[in-house]
Image (cartoon, helix red, strand yellow):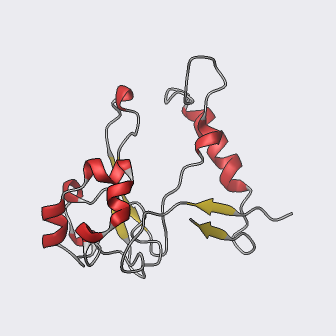
Amino acid sequence: MTTHLSARLSWHDSGWDGKICEKPTQNAYCIAHEHIRESRNDEFEDKNSRQRLKNISENKLPPCARDVGAFSSTPTHILHEDPLENRAHPPIFEEIPPYSFCTVPFEVMFSEEEGRTWVSPKEQEEQKKRLNNFFGELDKKGSLVFFM
């Protein structure tokens, strides 16, 4: 049986082409999505609309940067920041290849230990094992990605 993947993308008004939206402040999704709404910089994004992410400084990237290159023929880059504030892991800068996006199998990364939400970052081997098992089920030639 072939395994498929469902992935959520932040809405983009120009087809996830590796650039900031054409009209960022008119994108209702950016207002509805808490992570994006709380982290966006409307003035900067409007001033830099249609600019390729690869040409923008890593500390100025829009909060939707992890999705913007899903259908881009050029690479993009993003700054991964730990979503759990209490852990305070340093951000990691990464180049994302063309036609790529970032996704996290949240359920797979939950801890089975009572009182803990995630598998501890100190358990890197366990994290890698879980991620490899999850993504290892995908077949490069047969699996489909369904964007939501």
- Direction top: furthest residue: 115
Q: Is residue 108 left or right of residue 64?
A: right
Q: Is residue 84 left or right of residue 51?
A: right
Q: Position of residue 131 (x, y in %)?
A: 62, 46
Q: Residue at x 30, y 75 (%)?
A: 19
Q: Residue at x 23, y 57 (%)?
A: 58
Q: Is residue 87 above or below residue 73?
A: above
Q: Looking at the image, which is closer to me, 23 or 74?
A: 23
Count of marks, rendered view? 0
Q: Position of residue 3 (x, y in %)?
A: 76, 61
Q: Is residue 96 left or right of residue 132?
A: left
Quarter of the rendering containing residue 18: bottom left
Q: Is residue 127 above or below residue 145?
A: above
Q: Position of residue 38 (x, y in %)?
A: 27, 47
The quadrant in which the N terminus is found is bottom right
Q: Looking at the image, which is closer to me, 137 or 10?
A: 10
Q: Residue at x 57, y 17 (%)?
A: 115
Quarter of the rendering containing residue 109: top right
Q: Position of residue 12 (x, y in %)?
A: 38, 72
The quadrant in which the C terminus is found is bottom right
Q: Residue at x 36, y 26 (%)?
A: 86
- Direction right: furthest residue: 1
